[in-house]
Amino acid sequence: MKKILVVLAFGSFVDCNSGSTTEGAADSTANAQTDMVDSSASAQKDMIDSSAAAKKDALDSSADVKKAMVDSAKTINKDKAEESKDVQKAKK
C-alpha cells in the first residue's frame, strides 16, 4: 500500500511540475516570436527608410544638375547680349 501511495504522490508531483513548465515554455515561445516579428519589422522599416533616403538624394542631385544647367545657360545668354551691345556700339 505504501508503494502505491509513493507512486501516486510522485505522479502528482511530476504532473504539477510539468504544468508550470509548459506555461513558462509557452510564454517564452510567445516572447521569442514577438521579438522575432519586432526585429523583422524593424529591419524592413530600416530598409524602406534607406531606400527612400537614397531616392531623395538622387532627386536632389538631379535637381541640382538641372539648376546648374539653367544658370549656365542664363550666363551664356547674358554674355552674348553684352557682346552684341558691344558690337553695336563699335559699329556706331
Image: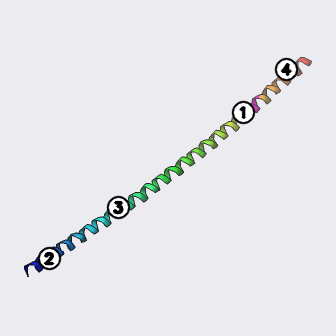
Residue most toward the left?
2
- Residue 32 seen in render: yes
For the residue pair 2 and 23, the one nearer the viewer reads as: 2
Dot 3 amino acid type: Asn
Q: Badge 3: few (under 14), some or many (20 or more) residues near its Cα, within 10 Å?
A: few
- Residue 92 seen in render: no
For the residue pair 57 and 80, the one nearer the viewer reads as: 57
What separation in Å lies between label 3 and label 2 (alpha carbons)? 36 Å
Dot 2 amino acid type: Val
The residue where tag 4 is placed is 86
What separation in Å lies between label 4 and label 1 (alpha carbons)? 23 Å
- Judged by depth in the image, the label closer to the viewer, 3 or 1, is 3
Task: Of the two numbered discs 3 and 4 on the same chain, state the one appearing first in sequence.
Answer: 3
The residue where tag 1 is placed is 71
Residue drawn at the location 36% of the way across and 60% of the way down: 32
What separation in Å lies between label 3 and label 4 (alpha carbons)? 82 Å
For the residue pair 89 and 84, the one nearer the viewer reads as: 84
